[in-house]
């Protein structure tokens, strides 16, 4: 497949004369100014949630990208406010894949993306928030990117560097399908207004989920300490940044992250890596149960179940911080 070099920014055109002298300024080459990539290419409604700023082809199906993580993101920040959340690396990998599909490989913007897997690992020391936004340099390698009939699929690997050091790595496997195909896959579930989402339950304490705010918690308690109900706020500006007919994959990733933290909240578990396989859509109108079990003190397996089938499987790797008191009890709200 023939590739085209992608300009990081469009050429800047001089303004029309206004009567003021500007000839001397026009003789000086205009600088390349930093902008985000089009938000539509990464399936975001808000420009503030676009983390990519540029892309260049550097080899066969290999790209160099730039990006930026804001210094004080409202969601992708550790509970103590000192680090970027590792899930932000996963979201960045997701955006890289979407951007390349649409901007480089010709997948129409109206196509839907089926995410089959998302893995990422981070270096906690490289996620520390500095005195300014974190400038990112990324290398993306695309494997088996191509069309099979009216479906586009591929496997993506991304290395994320910050200040010359590897901060995170990630991979994703996906398929893009046309709107008509997606409607057939979803059936009645995809028809707006037919399914009424479940009412949100009182969440577990934010501290036990590894979060600062109850608004960001996606799990509600049950009678079992290792089992929760998926119950996010559907008006959350990041997790549900645009309309969806099911729980997005990043909501399930966040559920797994919070379940790993909530399994032993007194240990202050700090996730650094996740590996997730998605098997079915998580519907909005039916209870989805999240269960966690420790494989080792630093590795926790999390699964999601709905209507008698497995929705996703995730492995969360991290470390235990020093024990800390929790704000409130480990279980709050009504029990299902």
Image (cartoon, grey):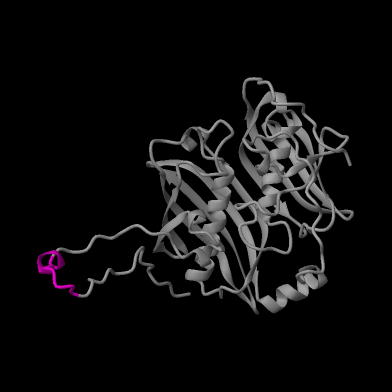
**Viewer can see residue 104:** no
Give the number of marks.
0
Q: What residue is shown at x 45% (from left), y 54% (from top)?
A: 139
Tell me where residue 32 appears, x and y as whole percent: 28, 60
Seen from the viewer's position, the closer of residues 51 and 316 is 51
In the displayed structure, does residue 164 sit left or right of residue 154? left
Taking the magenta stretch, the answer to whether it contains residue 52 is no
Tell me where residue 173 appears, x and y as whole percent: 63, 59
In the displayed structure, does residue 117 sit left or right of residue 284? left
Q: What residue is shown at x 63% (from left), y 29% (from top)?
A: 319
The picture quadrant where one finds residue 225 is top right
**Viewer can see residue 251:** yes
In the displayed structure, does residue 165 sit left or right of residue 75? left
Q: What residue is shown at x 52% (from left), y 59% (from top)?
A: 46
Seen from the viewer's position, the closer of residues 62 and 179 is 179
Seen from the viewer's position, the closer of residues 164 and 221 is 221
The residue at the far front in this view is 19
Tell me where residue 102 appears, x and y as whole percent: 52, 70
Q: Considering only vertical position in the picture, is 121 above or below 248?
A: above
Q: Considering only vertical position in the picture, is 264 above or below 17?
A: above
Region rendered in magenta: 17-27
The picture quadrant where one finds residue 19 is bottom left
The majority secondary structure of the magenta stretch comes to loop
Instruction: Say which quadrant the C terminus sits in.
Output: top right
Tell me where residue 79 appears, x and y as whole percent: 59, 33
The picture quadrant where one finds residue 64 is bottom left
């Amino acid at each position: 497949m023939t590739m085209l070099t992608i300009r990081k920014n469009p050429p800047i055109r001089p303004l029309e004369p206004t009567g003021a002298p500007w000839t001397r300024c026009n003789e000086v080459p205009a600088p390349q100014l930093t902008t985000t990539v089009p938000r539509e290419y990464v399936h975001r409604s808000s420009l503030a949630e676009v983390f990519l700023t540029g892309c260049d082809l550097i080899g066969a199906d290999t790209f160099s990208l730039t990006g930026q993580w804001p210094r004080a993101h409202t969601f992708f920040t550790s509970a103590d406010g000192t680090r970027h959340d590792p899930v932000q690396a996963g979201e960045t990998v997701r955006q890289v894949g979407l951007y390349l599909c649409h901007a480089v490989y010709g997948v129409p913007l109206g196509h839907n993306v089926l995410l089959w897997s998302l893995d990422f690992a981070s270096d906690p020391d490289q996620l520390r928030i500095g005195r300014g936004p974190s400038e990112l340099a990324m290398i993306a390698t695309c494997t088996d990117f191509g069309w099979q009939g009216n479906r586009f699929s591929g496997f993506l690997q991304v290395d994320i560097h910050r200040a010359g050091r590897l901060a995170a790595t990630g991979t994703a496997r996906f398929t893009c399908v046309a709107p008509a195909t997606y409607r057939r896959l979803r059936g009645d579930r995809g028809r707006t207004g037919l399914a009424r989402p479940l009412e949100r339950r009182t969440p577990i304490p934010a501290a036990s989920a590894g979060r600062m705010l109850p608004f960001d918690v996606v799990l509600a308690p049950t009678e079992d300490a290792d089992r929760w109900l998926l119950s996010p706020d559907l008006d959350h500006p990041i997790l549900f940044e645009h309309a969806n007919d099911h729980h997005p994959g990043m909501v399930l990733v966040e559920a797994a992250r919070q379940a790993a933290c909530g399994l032993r909240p007194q240990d202050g578990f700090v996730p650094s890596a996740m590996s997730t396989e998605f098997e079915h859509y998580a519907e909005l109108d039916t209870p989805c149960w999240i269960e966690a079990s420790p494989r080792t003190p630093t590795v926790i397996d999390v699964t999601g179940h709905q209507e008698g089938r497995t929705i996703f499987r995730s492995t969360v790797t991290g470390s235990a911080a020093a024990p800390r008191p929790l704000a409130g009890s480990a279980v709050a709200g009504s029990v299902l």
